[in-house]
Amino acid sequence: MSPAATPARRQLHPPPVAASPFPYNPGSLLATSDLTLAQVSHLLARATALESMDPQLRSGILAKRRVALLFYESSTRTRTSFELAAKALGADTTLVSSLSSSIEKGESLKDTGLTLRALGAEAIILRHNSSGAAWLLESETRLPVLNAGDGMHEHPTQALLDLRTILAHLRPGVDSVTPETLAGVTVSIVGDILHSRVARSNMLLLPRLGARVVLCGPKELLPELAAHAGPGITIERSFEAALAQSQAVMMLRIQAERLAGLQLDLEEYKAAYQLTGPRLAALAPAALVLHPGPIIRGLELTAGVADGPQSAILEQVRNGVSIRMAVVERALLAPMQGESA
Ligand code: CP
C-alpha cells in the first residue's frame, strides 16, 4: 500500500480539559498547597451547607455524573466516605481495587486511568502506595484527580476533615479561615511522622491558619529535617513537654507496612509515646484527642483514651463525609464555576 493510500489514523477522543500549565484540572485536589485559604473556607462552608441540605435536593447536584474510586491500598474511612459523599450528591460511583482488577495482571496506573476515562469516568479518586502517583494520573488523564493518600506524601482531604474537627471544638461556628484563625493554638502530632502523609498534610496546612505544630516522636520516626518542612513547625522529643503545651494532640499509628526493615522496640515506644489516661489527665486535661485511623488500641493510645470524653476520633470520621462531598462537588463543578486551583 502506498503512503497516499494509508488510511488516516483514527482520531482518539480529545482529553476533556485542554493542556495548560500544571495542574491541568482546576477540580483536582492533590495537596493542601493547591488550596488558597479562600478555597479552604469555601470547602468548609460547602461541607456545612451540603451536610444540612435536603437529601433529595442534594442528590441532584451531581446526578448521574461518573466518579471512579481507584484504590491500590486498603482503606476503610477514606474509601467509604468518598463513596458515600459522591452518592449523596447523586453521582454514580465505581470502585477499582488493585486486588480485583487488571492491575493484578500488570496494567499500569496510566493505562488504568485512561481506561477509566474511556469508560466515562469524569473524576478519579486515587489512593496509591507511591508518593506522586496522583500527579502522574492527573497529567496522563487530565481528569480531576482527588488524592486519597499517595505513599508518604499527602492526604489533603484528611487534613481538611481534621481542620473541620479542630475548628468545631476550638473555634465553634467558624468556617471562614484566615492566617489568624488558629493563632494561639498548638497542635501536637505524635508518633510515626516519617511515614505519615496525614502528618505532612496537617503540618503544611495548620500553620497557614496561625497554629503552631509540634512534632513529637523518636529519631527513627521523626528526623530533624521535618522541622524544615515549613514555617510554624517545631520538634519536641519529650511527649510530656509536647502534651503540656497542646490544645489538640493528633496520635499516629506506626505504619508497619512502610517501616522497610526498621526495628522498633514497641515496649520502649509505648513507655515514651503512648497516650494513656494518666498522661492525658496530668498534662492536657482539656486537649482534643485526634487520630486519623486506623487506631491500634494499646499501642499509640489506650482504649480508655480512644473511647474517652476528649476523643474526637469518630467525629473526624463523620466529618470525612461532609468534607468529601464538598471536594467531589468542586472536582466536577469547579471548571464550570471558573475556579482555578
Ligand atoms: N485515615 C485514613 O486514611 O483511613 P483509611 O486508611 O481507613 O482510609
Image (spheres, grey):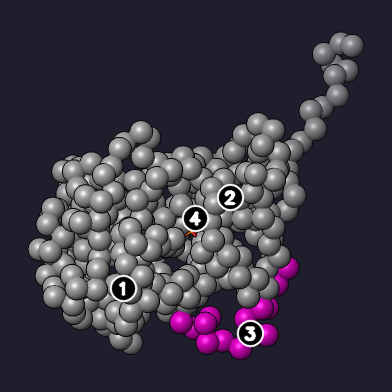
Residue lying furthest top in this view? 2
Disc 4 C-beta below 8 A from ligand 1: yes
In the rendered structure, find residue 148 and report the number of the disc placed on it: 4
Q: Position of residue 334 (x, y in %)?
A: 53, 64
The amino acid at mark 3 is Pro
Asked if marks 4 and 3 touch (Cβ < 8 Å), the reply is no
Spatial separation of the CA atoms under disc 4 and disc 3: 25 Å
Q: Is residue 196 left or right of residue 124?
A: left
In the rendered picture of this protein, how many numbered marks are placed on residues?
4
Spatial separation of the CA atoms under disc 2 and disc 3: 27 Å
Q: Secondary structure at mark 1?
A: helix
Q: Is residue 245 left or right of residue 288?
A: left
Q: If you read the primary sequence from the N terminus, does the residue marked by circle 4 or circle 2 appear first? A: 2
Task: Name the residue carrying label 3.
Answer: 55
Residue 297 visible within the image: yes
Task: Name the residue carrying label 2.
Answer: 71
Residue 181 visible within the image: no
Q: Residues within 10 Å of mark 3 (few under 14, many from 20)?
A: few
Q: Is residue 116 left or right of residue 71?
A: right
The answer to which quarter of the image holds residue 176 is bottom left
User: The C terminus appears in which quarter of the rendering?
Assistant: bottom left
Task: Name the residue carrying label 1.
Answer: 305
Q: Position of residue 230 (x, y in %)?
A: 21, 52
